[in-house]
Structures are given as C-alpha cells and as structure tokens.
Amino acid sequence: MVSPFAPSTRHLAWGRVHRCTHSVSRPRGVAEARAALAARGHRSLLPYGLGRSYGDCCLNPDGLLLETRGLDRLLSFDAERGIVHCEAGVSLADLLVTVVGRPAPDGGVWFLPVTPGTRFVTVGGAIANDVHGKNHETAGSFGHHLIDLLLLRSDGTIVRCAHDENADLFRATIGGLGLTGLILEARLQLVSVPSLWLENEDLRFEDLEGFFRLAEDSRGWTYTVAWIDCLARGRSLGRGIFSRARHLNDRRPPPPAPRPPRVTVPFDPPISPLNPLTLRLFNTLFYHRLGRRGRRVGVMPFDRVLYPLDGLAEWNRLYGPRGFFQYQCVVPPDGAFSTIARLLETIARTKQGSFLAVLKTLGDRPAPGLLSFPMHGVTLALDFPNRGQPTLALMDALDDIVLAAGGRLYPAKDGRVPAQVFRAGYPLWKRFAELKDPAFSSAFWRRVGEEETAPATERPA
C-alpha cells in the first residue's frame, strides 16, 4: 500500500521555537482518514489544524500528523435554532463568512458564542484546546456551547460523544489537545446578538488596583480585556489600558465581512526588531495613546475589537528565527492581586518584558473538559522573545509563583512546562490519561503526561 504520509519540516507551532520533522497526511473524508490510520505502523498520530497553538501541543516530532483542513465542509445550519453542523477542519473565519450574521428569530443575528483572539483556528482546534475569549465571565469557554461531536479512534471506530452519550470521552476530548482521536464533525450552538457592531471603550489606568477596579465596574459589558505595561514598576506597577465592548442594539447596515489580512510579514528578519529598546518605546507610546483624557469611546465592527492582530499575517515572524514563548497562567481570585503583582514585579526586574501582555478576569462557570484551562480567577498572558536560558529561567520563576497561588498554565500556549507543574494544575490528568487514545501523542504529552519519555528528535530554532 502506498503511504498517505509525506515528510514535512514546515509544520510548526505559532511560537516557532520548536523545529521538528513529521510525516503528514491530509485526509479529505472518513475513508482517507481510516486509510491513514491503517498505514501508521507503530508511529503515533496527532491532528493538526491551522497551527495556531503556540507551543508543542500541536507537534509530534518524528511521528504522524493528520492535517484537518481537508475536512472543511459545512454540513448544515439550522437558522431557527442557530445550530451549526460542520466538519472539524472548518475555521472560525469560514463560519464568520457563511453563517454568522444571519437573522435570528428574535430579531437579532447569529454570532459565535466564544472566540479566541484570532479567527484563524479550526473548529476541531477550538474544541481540542477549549478556547476562551474576552467574554468568559458571561459565556464560558468553547466547550460549553458544543452539542456533540464524532470522534475517529485509532482502531477505526467512530464514536458519538455528547453530554448524554460517551460523556466521559466527551469531557476528555474538550480541551484534550487532540489526544483522544481525530474529531470528524461537531455541532455548535450559536448565540443571538443585537448586531455585529460593538460599542467599544478604552480606559487608561495608572496601576494594578486600577485594573481590578475597572474589571469590577465593567460587569455589564460583554467583552473585557486589558493591555499591561509589564516594564512598569513601583507606583506604576500594572498600569495599562482597559478595553470593554458590547454588541450595539443598532439598525445601521451590518459591517462588511472580515477581509483577509492586507499586510504580511514576508520573511524572518535576521535580527528581531522586538528588543528591550523598542519594547520600552512601544509601551510608553501605547500607554499614552489615549491622550490627556485617557479615554476613547467608539463604535467598531466586531472583527476590529475581537481580532486586532488578524490584520497582520504571519506576525509571529517579527520575533525572528529563534521564535518566542507565550506564557499564560490563571490564578484563583483570592489573592489574585498580590499574585499578579509578584508576577509583574518578577518580569520587570529581569527586563524581559512582553509586547503583548494581556490581563483579564475569568468567570466561575465549571470547566467542561478534564483538561480545560479556564477557571475562576485572573489570567495573564505574555509573549517572551526566545533568548534561551534567561527566558527559560524567568518562566521557571513565574511557575513557582503560579503554583504557590494554586494556579495553572495554558497547554495551548505552552512549550516548556515541566511535568510536575502541569500535573499540579490539572488534578484530573490521570483520569484523562485513561481516556486518551493510546495511538495519539504529542511532544507536549510525552513531556508532561507519560511516566517515562524517550527524548524527541527536535532541532532548536
């Protein structure tokens, strides 16, 4: 039999730190997916969507990848109930063009219930990472709106998973990092919103207390998030800009559908322009961009608010050939102020600041998946240029603070967390290990989930 797998060194994670070799298959339906399973031999499998996971949870060094973009059919849309039935390789960008904005029976329009900070992720990837968005306090995570899914296991069986059927496997697959099998199809419940225009307000705050005060005062807003100047210290520690938005009840014509990115970073700069000097300059200018009033109010199309980085394609290349690490943690609400302050103080002291430092609160809705990241508390996300050992040492120090607070790290963003840190944050990991498909694996899982791990063949960036 001719192998459906072809060698590839081009399948990377978004952080571009890890460089490794895969064999890749691109099934376009169930028959081709089953043929790939049959041809795998003794090699492990892992689904791969659009490669927007930052670390190594989407990589399977020297193993097999099942690229899912060939599974891209919209199977049906129930316009009365707002239920989308699609294959797992359909992207959120596809849904924004095909079904989002259609009229709902209550006079509103259908919209994604939850979306991460980019629309260029597949439905299967959104399930596998149980993504959350700027509206977690009111909407929860992506898995909360999943009705059911079809899962292809390595033995060739197709299993329907839902709350009322194979419920344990359903909970394992939501946030399961693609390790329970290949998601073939899913049904998702959309939500009705008044319009696709958002009332948006940006507010400057002078310190970390200002963030917590604005977060408390913004309960009536749907989407909330804050940018933090992570180089600020002393009385200015935690200063930043708080952004909040909500769907406008307005009869103006709908905004145009989001366009493909107009600008692309075409190549890796030999030296990253993102360095301590440009970081300090950027943070100062960005913090003062609201002028003397420190406030800006406007009405914007949803994509400009929810997907601010999607206008620049391949922006991850700006970090240069060594790539970058993203570090995202969540800590419980009790003691969150002091914990976030310690994290920011540690980062500022090392002068390894982040251009994209994001702080927001998460709601108290119970997580739908065994390995779901969101929990009630405050989440901080940061991008660190890969400077080798100093960067790794900084993240180790941040781990100690997060663990002491009872927090955890986001597997979708991680590329180096030690096993003991992961297991402390995810107490249900052993139950998950019992439910994962034995033929599916990843660099991340071999690092954190297996008792004994053979070193993967990996080439540093």
Image: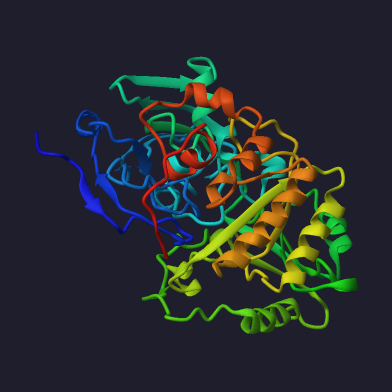
Residue 124 locus on image (x, y percent): 43, 39
Who's the residue at 72% across and 58% down the image? 359
Count the marks: how many? Answer: 0
439 w.r.t. 113: above or below = above
Picture colour scheme: rainbow
Tell me the quarter of the picture where residue 18 sits: bottom left
Report the front residue among 441 and 315. 441
Who's the residue at 65% across and 61% down the image? 393
Left or right side of 337 for 370: left
Report the front residue among 373 and 80. 373
Who's the residue at 36% across and 51% down the image? 457
Report the front residue among 300 and 312. 312
Q: In which quarter of the image is the N terminus?
A: top left
Residue 176 locus on image (x, y percent): 50, 34
Left or right side of 106 for 267: left
300 w.r.t. 420: above or below = below
Q: In which quarter of the image is the C terminus?
A: bottom left
391 w.r.t. 96: above or below = below
Whether residue 109 can be seen here: no
Whether residue 450 can be seen here: yes
Who's the residue at 80% across and 48% down the image? 219
Left or right side of 98 for 297: right
Extreme left residue here?
Answer: 1
Report the front residue among 382 and 259. 382
Residue 361 locus on image (x, y percent): 75, 49
Tell me the quarter of the picture where residue 317 sits: bottom left
Residue 142 locus on image (x, y percent): 56, 39
